[in-house]
Image (cartoon, helix red, strand yellow):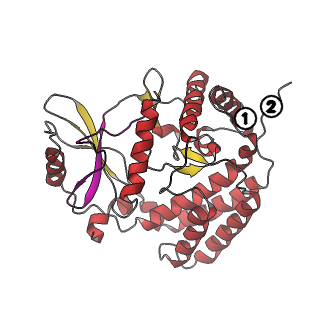
Amino acid sequence: MTDSAFNFQTLHPDTIMDALFEQGIRVDSGLTPLNSFENRVYQFQDEDRKRYVVKFYRPHRWSAEQIQEEHDFGLELLADEVPVAAPLVYSDRTLLRHQGFMFAVFPSLGGRQYETDNIDQMEWVGRYLGRIHQTGRRKLFEKRPAIGLSEYLFEPRVLFEQTSLVPAALKPAFLKATDALIDEVKLHWHDRFDALRLHGDCHPGNILWRDGPLFVDLDDARNGPAIQDIWMLLNGDKAEQRMQLETIIEAYEEFTPFDSDEIALIEPLRAMRMVYYLAWIIRRWDDPAFPRNFPWILEEDYWRGQTATFTEQVRVLREPPLKLTPMY
């Protein structure tokens, strides 16, 4: 697989159409690109006026075995009547191949945006997260990775030192702030949790509303603590986050227990996501889509802002973590 394939420069519309035709799918509309930087995702309509989504996976990111574990998890959730966007099966396979690319076809499932300030919707999401994790606890992924300090902090730190995207004059201060953040996370991180299979990237943008929640995009599914699928749904000040957390957890525990010790991992996980996300942009910089969509990474003010953000997160980590209101 060439670098141009890694960056999707060899994935042309004709290539996509041919790949679908090989599966007996006759496209009767244009290919509408959907918002995805990691993979290439398109919506289309077939000759029977049914709508689908096709996802071409970025080469070299996941192995075929890792993608298949994602697909199997989605199908397992669907069999458990959990509303997720699971891949369709063609000739007994969900993971398809064409000209070196791996891809999958999904039903096009529209919906409204999940309302993060809607308590009723929050309760629904909490219940279904409990059901997702009920399924996720049956076994662990064998091929997909687990959330941990190496992938999310230590490897990005090496990349930050090597990249030329950080202005030379600002790099010492940025690396110092990164090191301080890593040191603080190490003080607060623990692995005293029962790992399970997670959605992995359960933020509001990956939840649609269709008379209830619909969870999409299991591309970042991995093993880890249950709180990983909860903390990104919290917003506002500490009091608001506590109320939201209590609402979600109360609904969640209708289906599976929640270990309150994991709440202390919220801010370490937030810090890890900050570092990992920045490293992700740097790793993908040779893909023309990234300079086009993240031009501010070339500006000195951006790196000053990242330094300040990392420094502020150290302060947040030193504050007492959220606590659920005691029940009497």
Dots 1 and 2: beta carbons under 8 Å? yes
Placement of the N terminus among the 4 image quadrants: bottom left
Element marked by disc 2: loop
Q: Is residue 21 magenta?
A: no
Q: Is residue 216 visible?
A: no
Looking at the image, tell me whether mark 1 or mark 2 is earlier in sequence order: 1
Placement of the C terminus among the 4 image quadrants: top right
Residue 231 found in image quarter = top right
Q: Which class describes the residues within 10 Å of circle 1: few (<14), some (14-19), or many (20+)?
A: some
In the picture shown, does residue 151 fall above or below 173?
Answer: above
Q: Residue at x 67, y 32 (%)?
A: 249
Element marked by disc 1: helix
- Give the amino acid at mark 1: Arg
In the picture shown, does residue 202 fall above or below 38?
Answer: above
Q: Is residue 101 magenta?
A: yes
Read off the residue under disc 2.
Answer: 325
In the picture shown, does residue 229 fall above or below 97?
Answer: above
Residue 307 found in image quarter = bottom right
Q: Main secondary structure of the magenta part?
A: loop
- Give the amino acid at mark 2: Thr
- Report x, y in % for residue 37: 38, 53
Read off the residue under disc 1.
Answer: 242
- Report x, y in % for residue 216: 43, 38
Q: Residue at x 20, y 60 (%)?
A: 99
Tell which residue pokes out farthest to the right in this image. 328
Separation of disc 1 and disc 2 at Cα? 8 Å
Foreground pick, 74 / 47 = 74
206 sits left or right of 138 in the view: left
Q: Residue at x 24, y 54 (%)?
A: 97
Magenta residues?
A: 82-108
